[in-house]
Amino acid sequence: MSDFDAEAREWDDVPGRVERANAVAAAIREQLPLSREMTAFEYGCGTGLLSFALRADLGPITLADSSTGMLEVLKAKIASQRVRNMTPMRLDLSTDPIPDQKYQLIYTLMTLHHIPDADAILRSFYSMLEPSGCVCIVDLDKEDGSFHAADFAGHQGFDRDELRQKLSGLGFINIRISTCYEIPKNERFYPLFLAVAEKQ
């Protein structure tokens, strides 16, 4: 069982997580003209907090995660709230084949910094988007390593200029990056950026 599996049932109860999801959803709405005809894909969805905040603005949403524990909680939430436009999927883009379906919008919240080969995930996102589709990446700014425990094996956030260059190198255009939230932790605030980019 992964740490995320173990934490799934109490995930939504951690102070600040619902507020963060709502703030990120508001930032995405400000950046993009969402519609009920838009097909969407959330990667690293966890219990679906961000997609629940966006579900009234979008059409069919596929929610993907590698944690079975998170997906079990998500499925229960979808059933209890009788949500009709959200479909869970177990998927790890680091090891699994890219889905055949194409999407108009892909978004991910606080996921990339956990993935050693984040560049490969960005390439997958580009492949999964329809032409003129958009990706929204929300994650930590580059930090000094104090956000996670000392044994954390992922990235200590991302440099915005480097991320912009990576997205541009993949063929993304109209790239814009802005601060969308700050996480209070360890008696300081850690900024989150929202990177929005369009597939040519």
Image (spheres, rainbow, N blue to C red):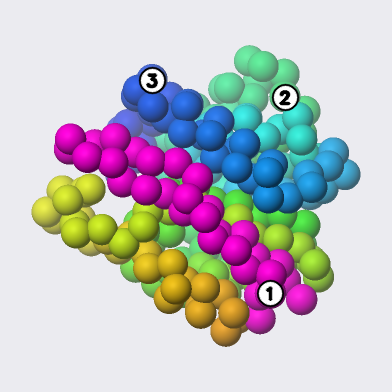
Front residue (pair 175, 42): 175
Q: Is residue 114 above or below residue 24?
A: below
**Which residue bears the numbered disc 3?**
13
Residue ranking furthest to the left: 150
Horizontal side of residue 138 vs 156, given as left or right: right
Marked residue nearer the N-terminal end (2 or 1)? 2
Dividing the picture into quadrants, the one containing residue 80 is: top right
| Residue 71, percent from left and from top | 51, 36
**Residue 90's mark?**
none
Residue type, numbered disc 2: Val
Of the image marks 3 and 2, the number of the one nearer the N terminus? 3
Residue at the image point whose x is 83% and y is 42% from the top:
35
Whole-percent x, y for residue 70 in the image: 45, 35
The three-letter amino acid code for the residue at tag 3 is Asp
Q: In which quarter of the image is the N terminus?
A: top left
In which quadrant is the C terminus drawn? bottom right
* Amino acid marked by disc 1: Ile
| Cα gap from disc 1 to disc 3, whole angstroms | 37 Å
**Residue 99 visible in the shown view:** no
Q: Say which residue label 2 marks.
A: 83
Q: Is mark 1 on a helix, strand or loop?
A: strand
Q: How far apart are marks 3 and 2 (CA)?
A: 21 Å
Is 167 or 46 nearer to us in this picture? 167
Judging by the rendered image, the residue that carries numbered circle 1 is 173
SS at circle 2: loop
Where residue 22 sits, quadrant-wise, is top right
Q: Give the range drawn in magenta.
A: 171-200
